[in-house]
Image (spheres, rainbow, N blue to C red):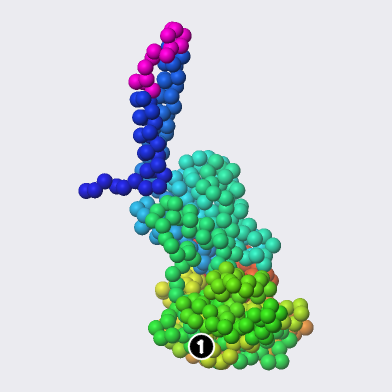
Amino acid sequence: MKPEKLTGFAWLEQQLLLALLLTLLWLFYLPQAPFASITGKTLWLAIQLAIAGVMLKLYWSAQARRDKKVDTATARWLVGYASQSGMALQLAQYSSKQLQSAGFNVELAELNQLSQQKLHQYQNALFIVSTYGEGEPPDNASQFYQLAQQWQHSFNQLQFSVLALGDRSYQNFCAFGHWLHRRLHSLDAKALQPIIELDSADRQSQALAKWQLLLNGFGKPVADTVIDSTPWLQASLHSRYVVNPASAGLPCYTVKLQLPAASTWQAGDIVDIQPENNRSSVALWLTKHLVNGCQPVRYQQRTIPLCWALAELELDKAAPPTRNENLSTWLTQQTKLPLRSYSIASIPEEGHLTLLVRQVQKDDGSLGIGSGWLTAWANEQQNVQLRLRQHSQFHLPDDDKPIIFIANGTGIAAIRALLAERVKRGQPQNWLLFGERRQQHDFFFARDIQQWQQQGFIQHCELAFSQDQATKRYVQHLLAEQQARLVQWLEQGAAIYVCGSLQGMGVEVHQQLQQLLGTEQVEQLMQQGRYKRDLY
């Protein structure tokens, strides 16, 4: 077997020690003649011994580092995650695989699986954690969050790093990740580096490069970014239409996309859309900066007009290229529009990927970039760049246990896909609670729901249209009115799926469940995977 070749710092360290050893030998063989007096000879001997001591100390330090490196390779590693929409889990899975490929003993675990005693078993830990809403932990970290606040024992054996995911539109950006970093540090754990913040809508962030650099330091370097290997797909816009004409709310569209053959997903999954600017915005930018938008550029492995490439950029942040600047290089240095994520409302067997998109209107009347692209600016049959993202925490159970589905607004999209999958499987124990403004205008997917109800696949359907009566009623009121049935279904092993707005419905439903069932039982349902939430 060939000896392992030393590289980098290890090689430099070896050469330095060899040089010091030669220096030591040279010093001891120097003639003593220049020092005739006893004092001079004694001083020279002391200098030689001091130098020898320093070199021995360097040697043993290097040996200790080498031994420590060997111990690290055999030590237990933890990759812990807290994920609500699946992105943190995806990153955790990638990080775990990269460490395992480098020969490390790695365990992947959600934070709720970690006790104080279990965490003491690890010497190294990487944490990838999302922040939910206004600074809350994700559901699969809620128990960990409560328990960890009471911990007292030292974790001085643990080295850790935190990748915190968040949304900059919320005031408390990456709050749970910061709490975790501070808490571990307060318990004597050693941070390998400062916390890394990642805006979940920004896939070009330097945060990913920093995290990849950290992983490369432990194992085999990887050239690609850490985000994932999920391929980008070119889907064509098949059709779109308004589903709430004359509604008091903002327009909602059913958008159907035709994906390439063999594309697949599961009910509950999410799609990431790369939005584009409208053509007038691109034309105004080109006119303002006196740039020719028809000139060809090499962009994303194809040659296209510059104006096409500009459609994907944040134009308000893009300074124009200089006269002699290479356009392809300039494009790679610009910030792309952040992705927009949507729940998928259909299953693959239906032939199209269906979305339910509510238009977002800014204060100046302009449309939001994601909803504007899908509902107004993209032409039918035009390509839409997207990628499918697995949301395993919102998938259906394998068995046919009863399911209680709760949704409001466009949250019915994911629930509609889950119900379609239950119908396909022939599983009829489904109970739907849905709320919106008015039944006449805002009953999304009404035809499907009514048909499944007639076929016996929705055993109970409770509807709350808040503006159809003088006293407003919401889905949390439906729960309170059906407490007996709720308890009965849960005793039969039912699971609860909630999808829709976090503020308002999400909070109110959670509090209502706590009042009806007790906080302890709600936490127990969450730990058992029988209470799942997809809120935004």
Give the x, y percent position of residue 331: 57, 73
Q: Residue at x 76, y 78 (%)?
A: 363
Q: Residue at x 52, y 51 (%)?
A: 161
Give the x, y percent position of residue 393: 49, 68
Q: Which residue is mark 1?
A: 236
Residue 298 against residue 450 in the figure, above or below? above
Q: Choose top left, top right, bottom left or bottom right for residue 71.
A: top left
Q: Residue at x 40, y 42 (%)?
A: 12
The three-letter amino acid code for the residue at tag 1 is Ser
Near-viewer residue (193 or 429): 193
Name the quarter where the C terminus is drawn.
bottom right
Give the x, y percent position of residue 397: 44, 72
Could you tell me if residue 515 is visible in this image? no
Span highlighted in magenta in the image: 27-40
92 to the left or right of 314: left
Near-viewer residue (326 or 7): 326
